[in-house]
Image: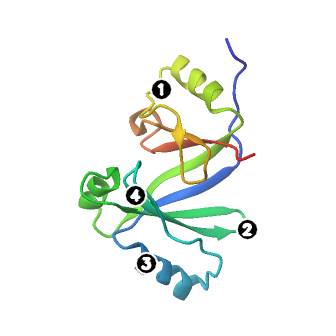
Amino acid sequence: MTKSFELGNLNHVGVAVPNIEASIEHYRRVFNATDISEIKDLPDQGVKVAFVNLPSGQVELIEPLGENSPIHGFLKRNPLGGQHHICFEVENIYEALEQVYSKGIRVLNQPRIGAHGTLIIFLHPKDMNGTLIELMERPK
């Protein structure tokens, strides 16, 4: 068995939004946010994203790319948007995957490349006290 993994830094909080451009403007107007990434389409994940960069992490703004997006259903239940997930860094996604499986935690996807260009997995919220958890391999 592989050694136990440890959670690293909180990388970001994912916030589902119905309109990413309006949300970016909201962060600029309300919080004077100036360090905001360009909007990026992630068709494989069915979303477009932008990151509000903060001294201690990021807020990931997520808008669905159509009705097949996993974010689309979330926004149907929460039309104003809201917290969708929190993301923690791990040193090795495959070690983390092995450990969560061994503890009976359901994983919603096989490791895939996320918005930061590193491998990610999502842990089922029913196994994580009602919160969707993303584990992201620490960027090198």
Specify the quadrant of the image occupied by residue 127: top left
Disc 3 residue type? Glu
Nearer the viewer's eye, disc 4 or disc 1? 4
- Return the disc, 2 or 1, that comes first in the chain's sequence: 2
Q: Is residue 93 above or below residue 42?
A: above
Mark 4 residue type: Val
Q: Nearer the viewer, residue 36 or 104?
A: 36
Residue type, mark 1 in image: Ile
Circle nearer the N terminus (4, 1): 4
Q: Residue at x 26, y 53 (%)?
A: 73
Q: Nearer the viewer, mark 2 or mark 4?
A: 4
Q: Secondary structure at mark 3?
A: helix
Dot 3 surroundings within 10 Å: few (below 14), some, or many (20 or more)? Answer: few
Residue 129, labelled with which disc? none
* Residue designated by label 4: 47
Label 2 sits on what residue type?
Pro
Residue tagged by mark 3? 21
Report the coloring of the rendering.
Answer: rainbow
In the rendered structure, are the residues bearing label 2 and label 4 in contact, judged by CB atoms less than 8 Å apart? no
Q: Which residue is mark 2?
A: 55
Q: Which residue is mark 1?
A: 105
The first of marks 3 and 1 along the sequence is 3
Of badges 2 and 3, nearer the viewer stands 3
